[in-house]
C-alpha cells in the first residue's frame, strides 16, 4: 500500500488533555489576571464568569448552580460522593475504568453497606431496567476508556427518590444532556473544550442542594470537599469564590474556550462537530474488515472517545501506535491501560474533521506495515 502524502494539520488525538480549539494561540488569551489574587475583584469576576457563562451556554435550568472545584473531574466526583452519599442506598453503575473507580471508592473507602453494583464489561453497558431509583445512582455518561455512552436519559424517572450523580467529563459540550434528569453533573476543562487540567466543574440541581443542607455524613470531610457551612450551602463557591487557589492562566484559557464554543454555534455546534468527526471514523470502519468499534451497539457508540479494536496482536497494536506517532500523524491514540488492546481516537469538537479525514488513510497504511 502506498504511503499517504497528506498529514493532519493537527495530530493531537489524545483523550485528555484534548486538542486545543482550532486557531488556538496562547497570546490571544486575556492575561490581565496573571499575578493577581483570585480573591481580588478581578479574580472573582473571571471565576464567576466561568460559572455563569457555563450555565448560560449549556442552557442549564433555573436553580442549577455551577462551581469551579479542585482536582479536575475526579475531585468533583469525590466531593459529591463524600458529601452526599450515605443518606440512602446507592446504585453504582460501571462499564469502564473510571466508573469502576467510583465503585471502589464507595465500597472500599466509604464502605457503604447499602451499595449495589451494576457492572458491565468493556464494550457493553449495564441493564438500566435494573436500576433502583429509590437509591442514589452514580454513573458516567460517557465511558472515556471504553467508548461506550449512555444513549439518552429516558431510563431516568422524573419522580425518582434518590439523586442521579453523573460523571459527564467527556460528554458535556458533545452530547445532549437531559439536565432535569441529572441532579449532579461533573466534568473537567481538558476534555471537549480542550482546556487545561487540574480544575473540575461541579453542577448541582435543587435536589442536590437540598441533600447537602439536610444531611451530614458520619465521616470527616477534608476542607476541599466541604460545600456547606452551618448547615447551609456555601453560595460563594458558586459565584467564583473557589475553595483553593486556581490557576488564573487556566481560567483565562477556559473562558477563551467558551467564547470559541459560542463562535461555532454553542452546544449545538460543538455536538454537531463531534458527530461529524464520529461519522468519518464510522465510514472508515464500515469499509475495513480488520477494525471494529469496542462499543457493541451503534446507539451506545461515543462521539468523543472513539475506541477501536483491530485484528492484531497486542504487540502489533502497540507497534502501529508507535509508527503513526513517529510519522507525526497521530499522537496518544493507544487504548487506555485497563482497556482491551486497541486504539482510541478523540473526536471531540476541537478536532477538525479534515484532520480525521487525513488520518484514516494513515491508519490503513500503518496496519499494512505492522500486520
Image: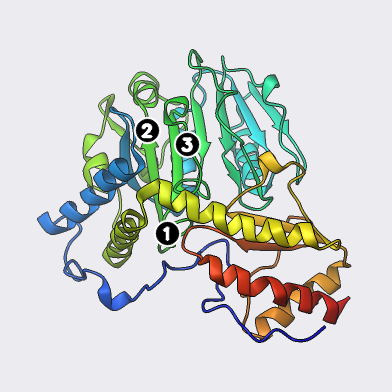
Residue bearing mark 3: 177
Please tell me how crowded label 2 is: few (under 14), some (14-19), or many (20+) other residues with Cα within 10 Å.
many
In the drawing, does residue 32 fall left or right of residue 125? left
Q: Which image quarter holds the C terminus?
A: bottom right
285 and 228: which one is in front? 285
Q: Quadrant of residue 101?
A: top right
State whether residue 246 appears in this view. Answer: no
In the drawing, does residue 96 fall left or right of residue 214? right
In the drawing, does residue 341 fall left or right of residue 54? right
Q: Earlier in the sequence, mark 1 or mark 3?
A: 3
Q: How far apart are the alpha carbons under marks 1 and 3?
A: 23 Å
State whether residue 118 appears in this view. Answer: yes
Q: Position of residue 218 (x, y in %)?
A: 46, 25
Question: Which label sits in the foreground, 3 or 2?
Answer: 3
Q: Which mark is residue 198?
A: 1
**Residue beneath the point at 71% across and 30% down:** 118
215 and 172: which one is in front? 172
146 and 229: which one is in front? 146
**Residue beneath the point at 35% across and 43% down:** 223
**Residue beneath the point at 33% across and 38% down:** 59
Q: Earlier in the sequence, mark 3 or mark 2?
A: 3
Secondary structure of the residue carrying numbered label 2: strand
Q: How far apart are the alpha carbons under marks 3 and 2?
A: 14 Å
Q: Is residue 132 shown above or below 203?
A: above
Q: Earlier in the sequence, mark 1 or mark 2?
A: 1
Please tell me how crowded label 1 is: few (under 14), some (14-19), or many (20+) other residues with Cα within 10 Å.
some
Residue bearing mark 2: 204
Secondary structure of the residue carrying numbered label 1: loop
Q: Position of residue 202 (x, y in %)?
A: 39, 41
Q: How far apart are the alpha carbons under marks 1 and 2?
A: 20 Å
145 and 295: which one is in front? 295
Q: Position of residue 368 (x, y in %)?
A: 84, 78
Amino acid at each position: 500500500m502506498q504511503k499517504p502524502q497528506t498529514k493532519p494539520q493537527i495530530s493531537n488525538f489524545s483523550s485528555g488533555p484534548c486538542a486545543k480549539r482550532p486557531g488556538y494561540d496562547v497570546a490571544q488569551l486575556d492575561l490581565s489576571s496573571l499575578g493577581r489574587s483570585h480573591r481580588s475583584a478581578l479574580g472573582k469576576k473571571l471565576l464567576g464568569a466561568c460559572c455563569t457563562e457555563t450555565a448560560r451556554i449549556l442552557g442549564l435550568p433555573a436553580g442549577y448552580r455551577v462551581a469551579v472545584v479542585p482536582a479536575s473531574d475526579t475531585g468533583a466526583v469525590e466531593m459529591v460522593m463524600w458529601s452526599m452519599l450515605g443518606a440512602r442506598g446507592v446504585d453504582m453503575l460501571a462499564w469502564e475504568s473510571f466508573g469502576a473507580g467510583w465503585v471502589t471508592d464507595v465500597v472500599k473507602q466509604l464502605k457503604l453497606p447499602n451499595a449495589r453494583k451494576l457492572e458491565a464489561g468493556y464494550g457493553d453497558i449495564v441493564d438500566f431496567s435494573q436500576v433502583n431509583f429509590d437509591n442514589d445512582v452514580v454513573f458516567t455518561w460517557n465511558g472515556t476508556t471504553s467508548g461506550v455512552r449512555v444513549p439518552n436519559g429516558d431510563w431516568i424517572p422524573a419522580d425518582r427518590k434518590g439523586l442521579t450523580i453523573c460523571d459527564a467529563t467527556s460528554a458535556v459540550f458533545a452530547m445532549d444532556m437531559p439536565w432535569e434528569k441529572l441532579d449532579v453533573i461533573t466534568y473537567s476543562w481538558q476534555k471537549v473544550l480542550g482546556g487545561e487540567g487540574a480544575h473540575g466543574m461541579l453542577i448541582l440541581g435543587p435536589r442536590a442542594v437540598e441533600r447537602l443542607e439536610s444531611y451530614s455524613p458520619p465521616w470527616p470531610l477534608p476542607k476541599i470537599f466541604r460545600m456547606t457551612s452551618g448547615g447551609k450551602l456555601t453560595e460563594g463557591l458558586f459565584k467564583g469564590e473557589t475553595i483553593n487557589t486556581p490557576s488564573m492562566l487556566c481560567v483565562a484559557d477556559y473562558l477563551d474556550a467558551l467564547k470559541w464554543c459560542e463562535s461555532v454555534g454553542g452546544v449545538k455546534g460543538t455536538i454537531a462537530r463531534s458527530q461529524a468527526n464520529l461519522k468519518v471514523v464510522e465510514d472508515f470502519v464500515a469499509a475495513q474488515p480488520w477494525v471494529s468499534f469496542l462499543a457493541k451497539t451503534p446507539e451506545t457508540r461515543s462521539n468523543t472517545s472513539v475506541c477501536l479494536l483491530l485484528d492484531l496482536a497486542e504487540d502489533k497494536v502497540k507497534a502501529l501506535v508507535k509508527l503513526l506517532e513517529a510519522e507525526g500523524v497521530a499522537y496518544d491514540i493507544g487504548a487506555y491501560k485497563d482497556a482491551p488492546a486497541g486504539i482510541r481516537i478523540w473526536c471531540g469538537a476541537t478536532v477538525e474533521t479534515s484532520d480525521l479525514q487525513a488520518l484514516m488513510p494513515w491508519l490503513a497504511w500503518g496496519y499494512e506495515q505492522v500486520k
